[in-house]
Amino acid sequence: MKVIAVEGGRPLRGELTVQSAKNSVLPILAACVLCGDVCVIENCPRLEDVEASAAILRHLGCRVRRVGEDLEVDSSGLCRWDIPDDLMRRMRSSVIFLGAVLARCGRAELSYPGGCELGPRPIDLHLSALRTLGARIDECGGMMRCRSGGLRGAEIVLSLPSVGATENAMLAACGAAGVTVISNAAREPEITDLQAFLRKMGVNVRGAGTSTVIVEGCRNFHGCRHRCIGDRIAAATYLSAVAATGGDVTLKGVDYRHLSTVTTALSQAGCRISSAAGHIRLQSGGQLRGICPVHTSPHPGFPTDAQAVVMAALLRSSGTTVFVENMFQNRYRHVAELQRMGANIRLEGRVAVLCGVPRLCGATVRCTDLRGGAALVLAGLQADGITQVEEIHHIKRGYSDLTGDLARLGAEIREIDR
């Protein structure tokens, strides 16, 4: 069994290029289903979730291969519309294939998705959007069987600005006759990146980044090349690591505007942050202070995916910080593991009250989910002694080389067999 071993107490210094965004790559890989041609995702990160998406594409009949750091997808041979349960369970975002397969094939059959256990993530918004476009969907025994005699453009009004539902609606609308208007759409940067990819593929789509996205159905897709945006959550992780340990690190390949709520929080904690096109620099003395309450919310609010790593950065801060998790019920599963290391965190439903402690102690802890696992690594960077982080497959779902990146910045960290 592989574990991550971390010895705390070392400041981080240097430069790091941030990987491409997992949450952009995954819907873009699903969008390749629409094309019937060759698409190349440049500098595609080597993630467990990317491998899971590639396995789904291959099952559907696509050819997927690595060419250096790029991933090439040829969907001209697509011949299936079903995705088996074992592939669906490998990641939560697998449901994003539903809209694309339905648009391409006129039918789709798949089970409910798996992934991190963050609490209920109902897909009713996805299904409602597809039904609005004319899909007939039967749910029975954990399966979804979808049929369409031809999707037609319509006005879709989402009750919540769900990222996944917005993406599924966009992908399905690409294959619908006429114009689709998606209201109360999610505004995340990854939605804008998906729009950029679809435009390269020949789709007339606009409005991403606002609450209204307009898609004109397309029948003449063509292949393209695309480089995804930098991963803002990976960037938030590295910024939080430097904030907690002290040091001076510059991150390249990331848009600082996508991280404004995170950098504001770390600035309040006492870090010095400077930003320009394509890079962010953070300097920290390692002595942080408590900050204003952190409320997670849809973009442009504070991202739920950054909650755990910013919490980890503040474990030894002076004062108290309150976190309010508005997106997922079970997003505090990492707290019990942090408490094993000496963290002082009190939970009351969706609220976590963190009181900084003078020191943390190394311990053996277990990853509970992707971002919670990263938070445990960040806690280990600050702790006295050695921390061993188990079940690191969660981390590998979203970080191409968290251990190697931190080591290159000066951390005493490595993967070992145990």
Image (cartoon, rainbow, N blue to C red):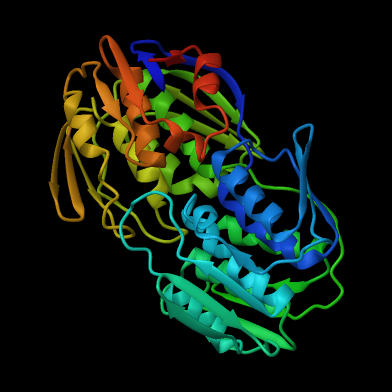
Quadrant housing the C terminus = top left
**Can residue 405 be seen?**
yes
Up-down: is 332 above or below 376?
below
In the picture shown, does residue 273 fall above or below 233? above
Name the residue located 87 percent from the left edge and 64 percent from the top edge. Answer: 222
Image coords of residue 323 (percent x, y): 24, 48
Q: Is residue 343 visible?
A: no
Q: Quadrant of residue 193?
A: bottom right
Which image quadrant is residue 149 in? bottom right
Classify the position of the N terminus by image quarter: top left
The residue drawn where x is 54% and y is 73% is 211
Give the number of marks: 0
> Residue 272: horizontal and vertical position, in percent?
44, 28
User: Residue 215: percent from the left, percent from the top?
Assistant: 70, 78
| Residue 95 vs residue 325, the one in the foreground | 95
| Front-lying residue, 309 or 371 | 371
